Image (tube, coloured by chain):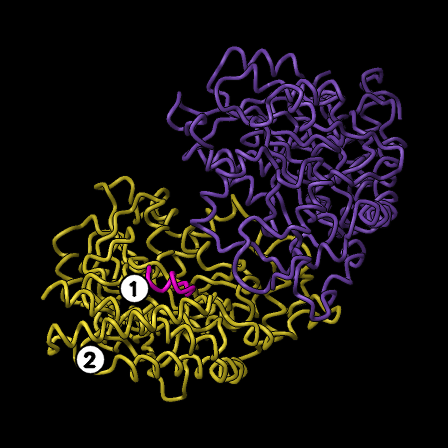
Chain colours: A purple, B yellow
Amino acid sequence: MQPIDQASPEQLRQQLSLLNQQFQQLQQQHLDLDLTRGKPSPAQLDLSQDLDGILKGNYRDSSGTDLRNYGGLDGIAEAKALFSTLAGVQDTEILIGGNSSLTLMYFCAQTALDRGLGENHKPWRQGQLPVKFLAPVPGYDRHFSLCQHLGIELIPVAMNDAGPDMDQVETLLRADSSIKGIWCVPRFSNPSGIVYSDDVVQRVAKLGKIAGENFLVFWDNAYAVHSLDKGAPQLANIMNYCRAEGTEDSVLLFGSTSKITLAGAGVAFVAGSPSNLTELKRHLAFMSIGPDKINQLRHVKFLRDASTIEAHMQKHAAIMKPRFDAVLQALNTSLGNHGLGEWTEPRGGYFVSFDSRPGLAREIVKLAAQLGVKLTPAGATFPGGNDPRDCNIRLAPSYPSVEEINKAMEVFVTCVKLASVRQQLNAG
Amino acid sequence: MQPIDQASPEQLRQQLSLLNQQFQQLQQQHLDLDLTRGKPSPAQLDLSQDLDGILKGNYRDSSGTDLRNYGGLDGIAEAKALFSTLAGVQDTEILIGGNSSLTLMYFCAQTALDRGLGENHKPWRQGQLPVKFLAPVPGYDRHFSLCQHLGIELIPVAMNDAGPDMDQVETLLRADSSIKGIWCVPRFSNPSGIVYSDDVVQRVAKLGKIAGENFLVFWDNAYAVHSLDKGAPQLANIMNYCRAEGTEDSVLLFGSTSKITLAGAGVAFVAGSPSNLTELKRHLAFMSIGPDKINQLRHVKFLRDASTIEAHMQKHAAIMKPRFDAVLQALNTSLGNHGLGEWTEPRGGYFVSFDSRPGLAREIVKLAAQLGVKLTPAGATFPGGNDPRDCNIRLAPSYPSVEEINKAMEVFVTCVKLASVRQQLNAG
């Protein structure tokens, strides 16, 4: 197929006719495929088959505490040791929770908003309203909806290949002290898959000095160990940079095993300065008897140490890599160098981010749905579902099989082409 | 020992001298015993040994859904079926959560306070402030601290042998529409162990008609199946009474398996009208990816049905009964008919409630501590830790062994006598 902006109207009409035929043929296949959400596949979940039953009647931690009983608001020592390594913090800088990092994020945002984090951190709600957060876009819809539920306004900032546009971030923070937070998915970002550069991480660690009082970086390192190949870029340790800057109180780090062990039955954690954690625990005590320590113990026995985790994640990569390859091969083969869109080629994470020609994302998602392929709703990667250029589509290839992805991508590229050719014809 | 209000000063001095000797002898034993909290004993936790490993690689529910993955905000169908029976509601009237009913209670109170439960239920915070709750006393300290954390004022109301003093409750509700809730532990109440009578349950079900708008009964049925013997009084079904009154929206029921299976790793639930649950779920969706469905499945496979639960609870009773007997025997033998206090003789639950002569609870707890026996702090069973008569002490015999309880109770009755005789002498 010829680059469509170089095609004559006649050539475009020929292409359109061909694409309409392909569309109809695909429609007759009555497909039912789903590329919407970042869910691990059953094969990935099978990798953690040994979790249930791993305790073999031994419910004690290394200090002899019976973990079946009440107590231990911030998790068991062994889990702190293991996951603090994963998070790159001290084991005094972590709280191990239940099965959901989202729940911890909500709790932290709500606590900072309504309660404050200690004497020097007044509740955001007591300052200038509305409270605002920076939202690097495209980003994660649940981060955005969490803020919207709490009445926190989101200001989109651009992402580039090295992370958020830090010039823009710093300018915004200097201009508006009611901006109290920023969302970051620093490694294999959702959805673009990029990894924050060392320079960006260092600049994020300095934001606490630039921003108004009580600024918090929500550092959601959901894909910390989720690389597709050994050469994937590493992420700099933000807490170390914070220590150098004296900004430890300005960052909360989140993570979980949802995409290491079981998506719905893993272990989540929040890491931060001891002073932040003390305040969080003080409030948590009113609403929790402590997390499920037995499931924490299962995870410690199963994941053991950093090298066991690494080996385990290589098994995930072996399952994920062919799926990403299928997506990228379809995009490169069918759309490469045609001016029909741009996309990322992530080295890890769960998503490929696709940008169509402006104004086509909604149309492409709609067309794909007509062919039985569910895509993440266009706009979902922007606050309020509002992608101003209507071009970003998140592709999530983890759950379907490679064959299903091949078929879904055949649909996807057909829809991209069809929408693009139609647009070009209308513009002509 | 003679009833002390009939003893002469000389007799009292003789008793005091004897008690001081006993106190010193006990002090030389350097005891370290704990009757503070309602924690299951290791023997009770062992009853649920089969939970871990029970799945044997089968992670699907009856509809074939893979429970390891994300989704299912309100729990799995099988858990709804099982625990709705326990709660006495329809399976459309229950939400199965994580490991903590306290977390669900906090979430419900906060949602009603800040968000409201639907169009007809405006957020309590938008009405007259402060929002108030009725607190039958003596009661459960975590209920009180939850309210205090949310800025909800607590109004104590008296408990009698059949439940809260409903005349007092109704009078208060008619007089003050800013009272938006009441705490109830309706079966084997914490700490008195009484069971609400049918009449009280029926009157509680009617409170929604008497109270101001959007009143909610927090029905914490923590000890629903925790009887010590087969003849223990049953609890009437409040939701059935609510249906008859049209007040289904006025009650939220809570429960968990914390004291059925594992205290820290059980399954908790909230039950209520479909309209209340819809609103709760709408808000929960912003802060949760769904509960740990795998642990729910474990519990369903382990607890199976009402008769399996009943048989399981009889094993608990066999462990608990001798402990309660030890407490009651010590009280009856050493303090019976001496005017030194009153106590309940619960047929289930986790506590014995002791009332000393007025003004002595703090002193007794202090004296016991000097002998190495930790008791629940005096006042803990009252809002703000303030027992106006300074007489209530909660005894929690579940965790220690019978031998330890015998020794702890020897200390306790000695301290009760010592404090009482001293008081009588000072009064004389």
Q: Residues within 10 Å of mark 1 (few under 14, many from 20)?
A: many
* Residue A406 in view in this figure: no
The amino acid type, in three-letter code, at marker 1 is: Ile
In front here: A370 or B377? Answer: B377
First of labels 1, 2 by sequence position: 2
Rounded to the nearest whole Å, what is the CA distance between mark 1 and mark 2?
A: 17 Å
- Name the side, left or right, on which A333 lies relative to A130: right
- Name the side, left or right, on which B402 lies relative to A141: left
**In percent of the image, x 78 and y 25: which residue is there?**
A341
Span shown in magenta: B366-374
Residue assigned mark 1: B364
Q: Please tell me whether mark 2 sits on a helix, a strand or a loop.
A: loop
Q: Quadrant of the N terminus of chain B?
A: bottom left
Q: Please tell me whether mark 1 sits on a helix, a strand or a loop.
A: helix
Percent position (x, y) of residue B267?
53, 64
Q: Quadrant of the C terminus of chain B?
A: bottom left
* Above/below status of B213 relative to A12: below
Residue assigned mark 2: B338
The amino acid type, in three-letter code, at marker 2 is: His
* Residue B71 in view in this figure: yes
Percent position (x, y) of residue A293?
61, 57
In front here: B22 or B198? Answer: B22
